[in-house]
Image (cartoon, rainbow, N blue to C red):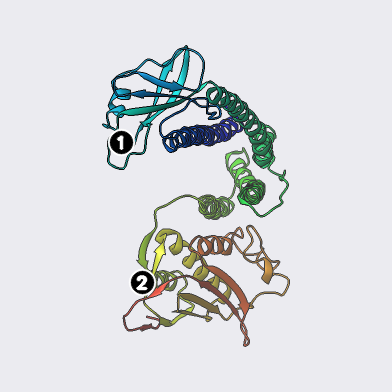
Amino acid sequence: MTLRTRLTLVAAGVVAVVVALACLTTYFVMRHELQSQLDSSLHSTAVKVQQDGGTVGSVYYGSNNTEVIDDQGELLGKTFKGPPLQLDRQILAVAIGAHPRGLYRDVTAHGSQLREYIAPATDNPFGLVDEAVIVYRSLDEMNRALERLKVILIFVALGAIVAAAVGGAAVSGATLAPVRRLTEAAERIAETGEPSERVPEGGHDELAALGASFNTMLAALEESLETQRRFVADASHELRTPLTSLQTNIDVLRGDIELEPEQRARLLDDLHRESQEMRSLIGGLLELARGGAQIEKQKFQFDELVEDSLERARAQFPAVEWEADRLEPTVVDGYRDRMERAVWNLLENAGKWSGAGGSVEVSLAGGELRVRDHGPGFADEDRPLVFDRFYRSAAARSMPGAGLGLAIVREVAEAHGGAVAAENAQDGGAIVRISLNGQPAREPARSFSRS
């Protein structure tokens, strides 16, 4: 059963219940009102008989039939032709004064339903009652009116239910139109595999918000697929060059050409260097590929991680002076292994560009890691692109690397809810910052210098 059908049935069902309750209330109220009017008419006639001293004779009392009996059940008078009513104990009880206020009842007599009011025939102040007046009228007219009302209410209820069903179908169709468009768009995207389609947006209700969210999701999916395509294309391009070089050197070593020991050693050195570059490139690609992987976060001391990376950098670049001006104790909730790779990429990049005799200054304060070298800095045309994957400036193409180091830094920073920035220092060199949502710990800051 479709959602539109269910909404239509719900609307019709709700209207049916409401209309049924309204019709039942109307019917019973009208029946009570008609019966009240009839009882009032019967009572008025009985009062007239009492005022006339209990005689009816040829007095006309409207549509009400009247007869008077004594306490023995003898008929004293009546206002209609035909046989009198059959007496019973209740009538005789009123005649002898057992019910001074009279009583109302429904009976069946002469083949019809009657409404009766039985009361003392005289208004005796001393309570001496020996006669009763019986005023009654056929209920056929009232029953016919109630039957007509019942038929009218049934048709009104059926008409309201049909109208509610038609209106519910129209309203649900119009309301679910955006959902139908979303469904059709999703089916087309599933069939073609291209999330470039968008659904029309409009209005300010929940369904309009759903359409906007769907378009946002499609845009994110399209961007993700485009990023994936670029990543695969760039990775294929970057892997092709070292693989070709490796294959060429291996073919030379396996060939029939006699090589001098120096030539063989040079080829083996090239193979070792190229294999190291391949290892670094594949490691960077794997780091970028797992950037969106769901890994459980853990809290770690960011300052201790930076300190460990500095010790590694001092060992890797002994000719560079590494200065830790200030490492403020900082706790980060995130991914320690990935952050360690990002920090190392920053330090390695700074060490390569500083060269022998250069210096690198590292500081951590307020959740921001700052790495400053004294190398050539960034060219103006390169600075906006340094965090892009596989981007290498003209000056960097003569150095080993695949252009993934700073791209990994940005990926890791954004995975921690942070950001990166690159700029040139006023007195020369480059500054790269990682800003994170770290929480400074309540411990005294520590300063480190080169060991």
Residue 219: image tag: none
**Residue that appears at 51% across and 61% down:** 412
Residue that badge 2 annotates: 304
Q: Is residue 51 left or right of residue 232?
A: left
Nearer the observer: mark 1 or 2; the answer is: 1
Question: In which quadrant of the rendered image does the C terminus lie?
Answer: bottom left
Amino acid, disc 1: Pro
**Residue that appears at 34% across and 76% down:** 441
Q: Is residue 262 left or right of residue 121?
A: right
**Residue that appears at 52% across and 50% down:** 286
Instruction: Give the camera-side residue of 24 and 256.
Output: 24
Instruction: Give the camera-side residue of 167 and 201.
Output: 167
Q: Is residue 362 left or right of residue 199?
A: left
Q: Is residue 447 above or below residue 334?
A: below
Spot occupied by residue 77 in the image (x, y as percentages of width and height): 43, 22
Q: Is residue 49 above or below residue 258?
A: above
Count of residue discs = 2
Residue that badge 1 annotates: 100
Res. 237 visible in picture: no
Mark 1 or mark 2, which has the lower sequence index?
1
Amino acid, disc 2: Glu
Mark 1, secondary structure of its residue: loop
Query: Looking at this rendering, what residue extends furthest in the bottom direction?
Result: 427
Instruction: Give the camera-side residue of 329 and 142.
Output: 142
Instruction: Give the camera-side residue of 396 and 168.
Output: 168
Q: Is residue 286 above or below residue 437?
A: above
Q: Is residue 10 left or right of residue 225?
A: left
Q: Residues within 10 Å of mark 2 (few under 14, many from 20)?
A: some
Spot occupied by residue 8 in the image (x, y as percentages of width and height): 60, 32
Question: In which quadrant of the rendered image does the N terminus lie?
Answer: top right
Mark 2, secondary structure of its residue: helix
**Residue that appears at 51% across and 77% down:** 370
